[in-house]
Image (tube, rainbow, N blue to C red):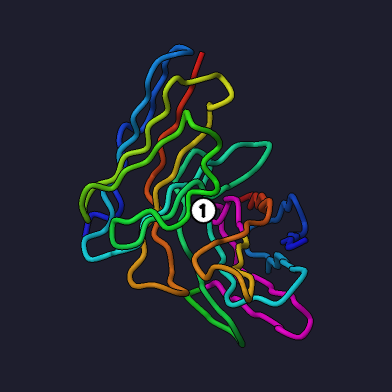
């Protein structure tokens, strides 16, 4: 398997622009996670999907952030409008089943908002 | 407050040395994960454990539930082991998918 795939790997955008990050989980995995990593706060869970349904979005910072999972093989994280404080590395991870499971992380998208 | 503490924050070793990284947590957990992140790179899951000990190659992870403590050991360290090692837990009674992360330990192994 190719592992979790994320695109783009790097994104540089200007404040106020819309940013869309994409994730393809490992085939057969039914749990998907979006994380944000910054120097100040480390890794934080933004949103968790199970069987394509958002289960926990309590980590989504504010209304500017939204995430969708239209099918089992694709998810997006959108920021609109983007702000410089959104600059971070965004990771997507997937796991099989529910409960305690090993999570497989994608390579991340490094977002820079100027 | 549910917290995860790692020590040391930074660790420098010579190739071949035995490495120990520690993780402690404040309350009961369901499982503990050790993750590896190379500079500028992605995150790889090394171990998930809830009791005892696991070994994979030169890496060994142990956990003591009573003492709320886990260690990650690297035997015969190599420069390619240089990375950030992150401890993460799911707390008992909470959501079993929700990882709480430590701040990481930056390991540098010099040749």
From the top left corner, tell me how far across and down residue B83 is, in percent. 57, 50
Q: Is residue A78 magenta?
A: no
The residue identified by callout 1 is: B80
> B40 or A68, which is in the foreground?
A68
Q: In x, y percent, where is residue A6?
A: 31, 41
Q: Residues within 10 Å of mark 1 (few under 14, many from 20)?
A: few
The answer to whether A1 is drawn above or below residue B12 in the figure is: below
SS at badge 1 = helix
- In the displayed structure, would residue B94 be above or below residue B101? below
Q: Residue at x 47, y 55 (%)?
A: A56
Q: In the rendered view, does A109 fall on the left or right side of B16?
A: left
| Quadrant showing the N terminus of chain B | bottom right
Per the image, is B78 magenta?
A: yes
Residue at horizontal 73 percent and vertical 53 percent from the top: B11
- What range of the chain is rendered magenta? B58-86
Quadrant of res B99 = bottom right
Q: Chain of mark 1?
A: B
Residue placed at 28% from the left, 64% from the top? Answer: A29
- Measuring from the top left, give residue B109's x and y in whole percent: 63, 52
């Amino acid at each position: 398997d190719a592992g979790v795939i994320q695109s783009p790997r790097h994104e540089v955008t200007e404040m106020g622009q819309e940013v869309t990050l994409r994730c393809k989980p490992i085939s057969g995995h039914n749990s998907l996670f979006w994380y944000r990593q910054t120097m100040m706060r480390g890794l934080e869970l933004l949103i968790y999907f199970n069987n394509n349904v958002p289960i926990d979005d309590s980590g989504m910072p504010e209304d500017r952030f939204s995430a969708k999972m239209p099918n089992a093989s694709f998810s997006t994280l959108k920021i609109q409008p983007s702000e410089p404080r959104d600059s971070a590395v965004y990771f997507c991870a997937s796991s099989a089943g529910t409960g305690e499971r090993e999570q497989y992380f994608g390579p991340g998208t490094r977002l820079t908002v100027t | 407050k549910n917290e995860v503490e790692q020590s040391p924050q930074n660790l420098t070793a010579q190739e071949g040395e035995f490495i120990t990284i520690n993780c402690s947590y404040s309350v009961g957990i369901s499982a503990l994960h050790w993750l590896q992140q190379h500079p500028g790179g992605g995150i790889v899951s090394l171990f998930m454990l809830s009791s005892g000990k696991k070994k994979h190659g030169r890496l060994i992870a142990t956990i003591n539930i009573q003492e709320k403590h886990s260690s990650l050991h690297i035997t015969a360290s190599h420069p390619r082991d240089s990375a950030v090692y992150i401890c993460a837990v799911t707390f008992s009674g909470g959501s079993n998918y929700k990882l709480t992360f430590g701040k990481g330990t930056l390991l540098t192994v010099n040749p």
